[in-house]
Amino acid sequence: MKRLFVIFAIMLCTIIPANATKVPENVRNFISEEFPDTVFRFDGVVILPDGTVYLPLIPSKFNEEKPVDIKYTIPAGKNLAMKPDALVLDNDYVLLKLLKNEKGKNTVINLPAPPVELVTGLFPQDMLVPKNFVLPLSLKNISGNLDIQIEKANGLVIPVATPKNSYINSLDSVPVLKNKVMYIASNLSKNIQVVNPAKGNASYALAQEEIPITIKGYDVFLLVTSYGKKSMDVISLNDDKVIKEIEFKTQPEEIVIDNKNKLAYISSGESASMYVVSLETMTIKKQIRLNGMCEKVIISDDGTRIFYNDKQTREIWAIELDNDYLLKMVGRFPNVSKIEYTNGKVYITSRTKNRLAIIDYETMGLMSENEISAKPVDMLSYKDTLFILSAGDKAIDVIDTTIDSSVGKIELQNIFPTKITQIDDSNIAIITDAGAGNYSILDMDKKAIIKTNKLDIPVNAIYVTKAANKVGAK
């Protein structure tokens, strides 16, 4: 029996790779100071005395001799004794704590925008992968050639790491933002950030497989189109889950909502089409054939007109939704940045010409062409006023649409303002920034900025709505 045990031990030793990854001596010393009885496995895995397991991420280049210390942790401000979910050392060596996901599978921390040390590191390629281990989609590249299952993102909640020096300045003092939630698409992450205005930073995120093109809300649902995906996700805000994927023949892009008739219109430039989706059944009702590759899509307040720009010909077209989807050409304009329709007139801005063209819809004749601030990017009509947002001059031109003349200019503190979004049907609009996490709050009755606030991330698109009642919440 003793001889069999010895033979087995010899065989066990022979299956351990000769080039097995070991924890660097300086990292071993750092961990052993806090936990003397730590097990450093031959494949680089670290097991603390209480059974807590850390998986190593090896940077492409690091110092193995110089004593190490903590660079930062996730969550922030922890020490080794507190066993954080992620430990980044000052030589960029990373230790990821083995966790359990909601399905009981082994995993590691899931972040919408992992820091650079996490996405550029690599698991030891001889590491014995834990049983039933799944890797978050945002960290899929760290697996290298290991056979590891990647967790598919489906719109479920994932945690967000709050930066140590995050700027928090409540927006809750603006009455219209009380009890509201912001859903934000950013160029820094594929995932949709969920922000409580009272806190000023993301509470969590909704994981997405691809970068969103458009996010629009209706009732307790969020509609999302994404690059490289021929479907539109319908996310229930009551439980933060994808409840339906509406399939299209081609890439769906922009979304406009007709709340009155409970319809969504989804453009697809690839097929020169506009799809009509019922918001009651979340099904496609009709496919409207268009002229050209549609972009810059808007819908009139009464839901009778849709306007779009053909990105190939630079022609602007109108769809008369109440007239058997009749197409009418408005005209040809250079570098269109935004279209707006109000009081029977079509307003068109040119990003490069810095001009506002005004068209009489009845005659399709040019009424006037006005100089405006540099690099206009967005417009919003409210009552008899048109607010034109310009990124170049960081300002809002205020146009009286009864006389079609400028009545003022509002200066902004934003770095690169790109969107102006009305909150519900109120007099308040949010000006968001794609260059930095800035929000300016515009009172459209007073025609003045009443507050500017910073957030953790820049904003490409935003949807503001009443906080939904979560399923299972007490």
Image (spheres, grey):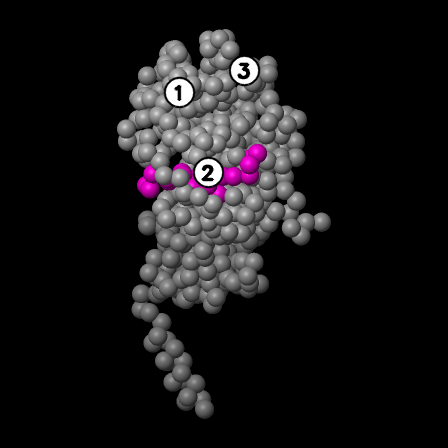
Q: Residues within 10 Å of mark 3 (few under 14, many from 20)?
A: few
**Whole-percent x, y for residue 457 in the image:** 48, 34
Where is mark 2, residue-wise?
A: 265
**Whole-percent x, y for residue 345 in the image:** 45, 18
Nearer-the-camera pick, 3 or 186: 186
Amino acid beneath label 1: Ile
Amino acid beneath label 2: Tyr
Where is mark 3, residue-wise?
A: 384
**Whole-percent x, y for residue 227 in the image:** 38, 43
Using residue 166 as the reference point, say whether residue 149 is left or right of it.
left
C-alpha separation, residue under disc 1 versus residue under disc 3: 16 Å
> Does 65 appear above or below 186?
below
Residue 176 lies in the magenta stretch: no
Residue 262 lies in the magenta stretch: yes
Nearer-the-camera pick, 253 or 30: 253
**Whole-percent x, y for residue 208 in the image:** 46, 47
Q: Is residue 38 visible?
A: no
Q: Quarter-wise, where is residue 10 in the image? A: bottom left
Instruction: Choose the circle earlier in sequence order: 1 or 3.
Output: 1
C-alpha separation, residue under disc 1 versus residue under disc 2: 21 Å
Where's the N terminus, which quadrant?
bottom left
For this orientation, the residue located farthest to the left is 313
Instruction: Choose the circle earlier in sequence order: 1 or 2.
Output: 2
Region of the chain picked out in magenta, as a range:
259-277
Where is mark 1, residue-wise?
A: 348
